[in-house]
Image (cartoon, grey):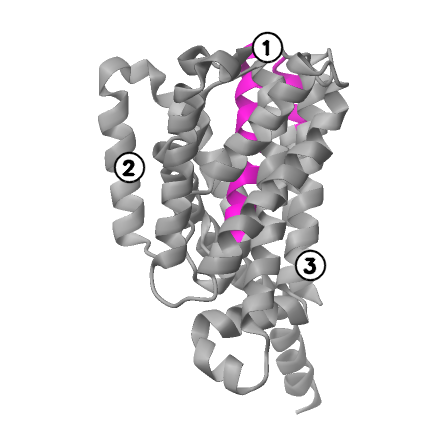
Amino acid sequence: MLRHRLDLAAAAVLVGAMALLPLVFPSNYLIGVLTVSAIYGIWAVSWDFMSGLTGRENFGHSLFIGVGAYTAGFLNTSFGANAWWSLPAGMLVSVLFALLIGLPTLRLKGPYFALAMLSGAVIMQRLMLIFWEYTGGEEGINGLEPLIRSQLGFYYFVLGTLVLMTVLLLALARSHWGLILRAIRGDEATCQAAGINVTFYKIASLVISAACAGAGGAMYAHYQLQVSPQLFAVVTSITIITMVYVGGMGTIYGPVGGAILLVLLTELLREFGEWRLMVYSCALILILFFLPHGLVAPVWKKLRSLLRRKGKEPLVPVASDAMEQRA
């Protein structure tokens, strides 16, 4: 019971800090950085729900992000649809791509799923360049309408979406569903022998992951007011995976902290100029080498255990004092 209270308190503090920062330090630059960090948080938590829980690494998560973003771009610029239709449309098209790739590959063992996702992202990036007459080529699609005119209002919308997705995915991860996904990661053959439809759970988790990533891609498109093939790049997927590992894979809430931490770290290191990339890379190497289970989630677990011990410690001396007085 105390554990859940501590988790809720920590989440409330983090969300409250994220909400108050733009008010305490009113700056369009800061709001922009926080908005991007929240969007990356959505992408990271969506990756972790499928790959972190099942152990089936997705090296092409950028496919769902790019598909969601380009769906938003085409709907808004080519068909003149309202910007708010981009969110459900981006989620739907991303789900279709997830089914297209997941149905044949998640039934197989080995690295086929990871390679298929990686190939899908690379192929889509190339197609966006080949059919430049429709996609805009390297320049992409420009002239998208913002979802919310106010920059601060859009940030709060993205932050609220991140909180909602994290709560829902965390609830699923801690339910019977999440238990099965972790069991699949531990021993897939045993799960099949127990009569569990392993393929269904893997595909369903991929669909949920793709839907969340597609929504994040559509938000990013309407935030940048343009879409480019760079969203499909492999580096986008690697960045998200790195955020998940830094946050703590398989924890759901850890990748959110990892995404926010690394985005803020990237901006803070701008003062180093051309040395920024080297300092950033060295920091990541140190984190991943000395903390193989991540930084955010393991640190919070240790801190939570210390707080729980402190909350229980006063009971021992009080009881001993009472016994001494009786003696």
- Residue at 68% from the left image edge and 41% from the top image edge: 163
| Earlier-in-chain disc, 3 versus 2 | 3
Can residue 134 be found in the magenta stretch?
no
Secondary-structure class at tag 1: helix
The image position of residue 9, as x and y in percent, is 68, 49
Q: What residue range appears in magenta?
A: 19-48
Q: Nearer the viewer, mark 3 or mark 1?
A: 3
Can residue 37 be found in the magenta stretch?
yes
- Is residue 319 left or right of 256 when viewed as pictured? right
Please name the residue that numbered disc 2 is placed on: 283
Amino acid type of the residue tagged 3 in the rendering: Ala
Tell me if mark 2 has few (under 14), some (14-19) or many (20+) residues whose alpha carbon lies within 10 angstroms of its own. Answer: few
Which label belongs to residue 118?
A: none
Amino acid type of the residue tagged 1 in the rendering: Asn
The image position of residue 10, as x and y in percent, is 63, 48
Secondary-structure class at tag 3: helix
Q: Is residue 242 visible?
A: no
Secondary-structure class at tag 2: helix
- Residue at 65% from the left image edge and 14% from the top image edge: 78
275 w.r.t. 326: above or below: above
Q: Separation of disc 3 and disc 2 at Cα?
A: 32 Å
Q: Separation of disc 1 and disc 2 at Cα?
A: 27 Å
Please name the residue that numbered disc 3 is placed on: 171
299 w.r.t. 184: above or below: above
Amino acid type of the residue tagged 2 in the rendering: Ala
Please name the residue that numbered disc 1 is placed on: 28
